[in-house]
Image (tube, rainbow, N blue to C red):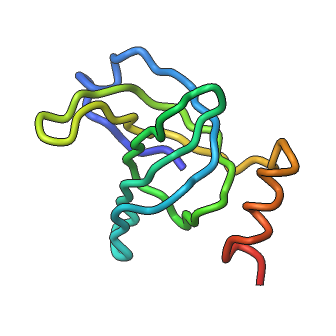
Amino acid sequence: MTASLPASVASLPSETLQGIVERLTFHAEDSGYTIARLKVAREQDLVTITGTFANIQPGQTLKLTGFWRDHPKYGLQFQVTHYQETKPATLIDLEKYLGSRLIT
């Protein structure tokens, strides 16, 4: 999914992150706007991600494209402009995926 962004934001350098959604902090059903916490390999702390997601659940492994921004109140966040669900990479990732509500 790709969000349309203002020209000033679209010119920011984009980066790619991959990780597992640990928890949802906020999700608006009507718009899909989401604030979530992502576990990224080799990072001790969880990363806050924001963006519009059609269907996001804890346990999903996502590859994200976006940019970093420093929110005045909430600090450093990764603003997602595009995402793709990927397969779990490790046994622990697979266990989290199978334990999530993604499989019914």
Give the side of residue 41 with respect to residue 28, left or right. right
* Residue that appears at 77% across and 77% down: 103
Residue 85 lies, with reference to residue 11, above or below; the image says below
Where 28 sits versus 88, above or below? below
Q: Residue at x 45, y 31 (%)?
A: 66
- Is 5 in front, or is 45? 45
Image coords of residue 64 (percent x, y): 57, 37
| Number of marks present in the image shown | 0
* Residue 75, percent from left and from top: 23, 34
Q: Is residue 104 left or right of residue 1?
A: right
Q: Nearer the viewer, residue 20 or 30?
A: 20
Q: Is residue 88 above or below residue 100?
A: above
Q: Position of residue 99 (x, y in %)?
A: 74, 71
Residue located farthest toward the left when viewing the structure as drawn:
72
Q: Residue at x 75, y 47 (%)?
A: 86
Name the residue at the front extreme.
44
Q: Quadrant of residue 34?
A: bottom left
Name the image quarter holding the C terminus. bottom right
Q: Most extreme residue toward the bottom, as rendered?
A: 104
Determine whether, in the image, residue 18 is placed left or right of residue 93: left
Residue depicted at x 52% and y 40%: 82
Q: Position of residue 19 (x, y in %)?
A: 63, 41
